[in-house]
Image (spheres, coloured by chain):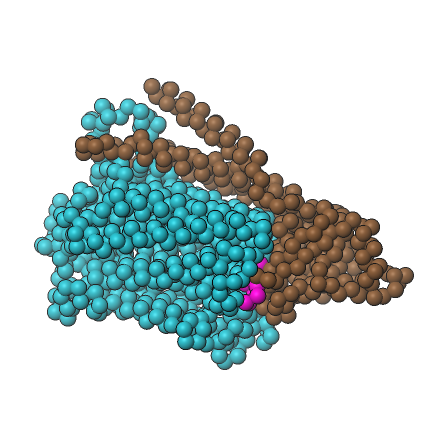
Chain colours: A brown, B cyan
Amino acid sequence: MPLSSAIRSVLLGIVLVVAGLWIGQNIKLLPVDASTNAPVYDELFRVLFSIGAILFLGITGLVVFSLIKFRRKPGDTSDGIALEGNLSLEILWTAIPAIVVLFVGIYSYDIYDRMGGMLPLDHGGHNHQNMASEERIWGGISSGSIEKSGMVVNAPLPVEVTAMQFAFIFHYPKGDITSGELHVPTGQPISMRLESRDVIHAFWVPEFRLKQDVIPGQPTILSFTATKPGRYPIICAELCGPYHGGMRSAVIVDSPKAYEEWFKNNAKTPVSEL
Amino acid sequence: MTLASSPDLSKESEPLQPKGWLRYFSFSVDHKVIGLQYLICGFIFYLIGGALASAIRIELTSPISDFMPRDVYNQVLTLHGTIMIFLWIVPVVNGAFGNYLIPFYVGARDMAFPRLNAVAFWLIPPAGLMLISSYFITGAAESGWTAYPPLSINTPAAGQIIWILSVLLLGGSSIFGGINFIATILKLRRPGLGLMQLPMYCWAMLGTSILVVLSTPVLAGTLILLSFDIVAHTGFFNPVMGGNVIVYQHLFWFYSHPAVYIMVLPAFGLVSEILPVHCRKPLFGYTTMVYSIMAIVVLGLVVWAHHMFTSGTPPWMRLFFTIATSFIAVPTGIKFFNWVATLWGGRISLNSAILFSCGFIINFVLGGITGVALAQVPFDIHVHDTYFVVAHFHYIVYGGSVFVIFSSIYHWYPKFTGRMLNENLGRLHFLLTFVGFNLCFAPQHWLGLNGMPRRVAEYDPQFTFVNQLSSAGALLMAISTLPFLWNVFQSAFNGPIAGDNPWKALTPEWLTSSPPPVENWEGPAPLVKEPYGYGETPETLEVALDKDLELGGDEK
């Protein structure tokens, strides 16, 4: 009898793990992935969802099973087992979560690193350039000040973003273009300098899995590389006043050719000087 | 059970209180009266906060801002958050049940500082009234319950200042309560009662009160600086004056993350009291439960910056707070496994108290899982400040704490009133709440992942249907209050007489009459060394134990 019960538990555990992994791999809850970071993010999401599904189904299953199996039958006035604890069991369910959490932490560190989040920040411009040459993805956020980054030639396309109640304004230093919508080519790293004129706003593009607060008094650099042409919303995610919900814009991702077209049509400085 | 004489504490103050129901409107120093004052006052604010939540859900049934003006919407969401946290959950899980139960559990006749206790309660109604009336008189604060500057400095000043004053009063009340609980648990224990013999709720309240006393003063200081920025035009947090807005966030979350544990740790304690009684089993793993509470207290103080992953925090800080936050899952997980093990092999009465407790376990596990996910910086960067976060924290504070509050009301109502609640109405209440709650908040995870930010009155029309689904869930939650209110009111007069100990419980509050006399027990306080001594002896078990080998097997 003890053996069969142990085998049953192990089998149930295996079924649970397989089910969780299956759910995690097949669930579709996220919008289209349109930046180099997005597929990396989605990988993390699937892993977390699998672990979460296993835990949730496991504990919910145990609770529901207990409520049905061990419910008091009418007329039964007896007590349950006088079981006050079980050291090996308690060590087991301290150790397993600790290992899972450690794995999740290390794994998400790796994901963060792959997104470029661990690049040192204090030499803004230098790393900015390295990033491009090493083709690292920078989905993290640099709080390094833009002043330090200096002149960058042939580097990521610089865009200056100004947030204010209740709009985003995009300025392209090359060509001196000012636009209410962000235009970017695919495959080209974009380096944005974000600044706010009044309160805290946040720059969020769900399809890029990218968000950064735009903080007054603290210019921030944010880089990304778009991969799929299309038109995606830019959403302010930080409560900024009565019209917060209406503070939206769009990012238009074009093929490099189409982008070049747009750029030439809008550039104020003659194209030859670029 | 050994008997011991206790010092007579409240003889002089007794004549000061009116008799009968008038006690509940007086400056009573009886901890039981104060506990019920907290509970009823909190519930009234819960109804107000719930009405505000309904207004939010009505606004969100359509993608355009059409139900109320935009600035009113921001006032409503600010008041909703502030009321639910500071006037409902914190005072009820701490003040109401803490005041009612802790003196019983330690074998005392009252709290250590009865008058301070009454002051702590009587700070709450004026603070709450001030906060709510600000909406009608000056316009309420509209910068969210987080009151991030510079928005809180730029919005109309009167409402914001009143908001700061009420939160300061409520924070003061909370600190008074915390000091009182620490003193009572550590110093008023009946002779012969050891710390490791206390019911688990005492440990939860000890841990919570340590958090309250350490972190609430930081919030108070921060809000005072913020009020200087607003009225005296100083520049602590105002970037125009050279201030730093991020510093405010650090200070604010140094309190407001522990505040989450101030809301859930007492709930953990209450569940630990309720489950053993209705499962007829000892609480599983008492010692690990105690240590995990203390681990949560320590870790809870060093995780605040996970609310600021998109605020431009440097990588090392992100990494540290990710790891620290993730590790809170370990002690929390221990508690959940121990509760499941307490259920296992019990004789579970499927009454309202146990249903709400089990609903809490299921909801909180989901909220905990999304919490560990949110602790991961790369994950958080996408969903921060979205409806995913809204769903997550409602699973923690509503699915967690509020479910436990209801469970506790079903469990202790016979003690409070001497009468039983109607169980069928209670089960109906549970069903409506559980279905409504999950229908309301589960879809919000999807909304957040797909691009709906929080605190908006208007949104992308593609989210309309899911938002209406969520609003339908909110409607069910609102309806679920009706059977509960009816049950509580009519049972107070017509409910069956409960007797002293209807659940056959062993904790000291049940070893007296229902409702208990002013000094808690006629005669000396009982000494309960095994508050969870339920269960059949191993000999009688041999027969009963047939399929529970998983738990029994490892031991031998």
The mark total stands at 0
Using residue B189 as the reference point, say whether residue B155 is left or right of it. right
Q: Which residue is depicted at the point 74% across and 56% down?
A: A183
Q: Is residue B233 above or below residue B44?
A: below
Extreme bottom residue here?
Answer: B232
Q: Is residue B350 above or below residue B95?
A: above
Q: Which of B93 and B290 is in front in this view?
A: B93
Q: Is residue B74 above or below residue B345?
A: below
Prevailing secondary structure class for the magenta stretch in the rendered image: loop
Q: Where is residue B103 in the image (x, y as percent from the top left)?
A: 22, 56
In the depicted structure, whether residue B479 falls above or below residue A270: above
Q: Seen from this angle, which residue lies furthest left?
A: B523
Front residue of A52/B2: it is A52
The image quadrant of residue A264 is: bottom right
In this view, the residue farthest toward the right is: A272
Q: In this view, does A46 lie to the left or right of B125?
A: right
> What residue is drawn where x is 44% and y is 60%?
B55
- At x 83%, y 60%, the residue is A265
Q: Is residue B206 magenta?
A: no
Quadrant location of residue B63?
bottom right
Residue B326 seen by the camera: no
Residue B404: % across, % down: 33, 49
- The magenta region covers A237-244
x 21%, y 65%: residue: B24
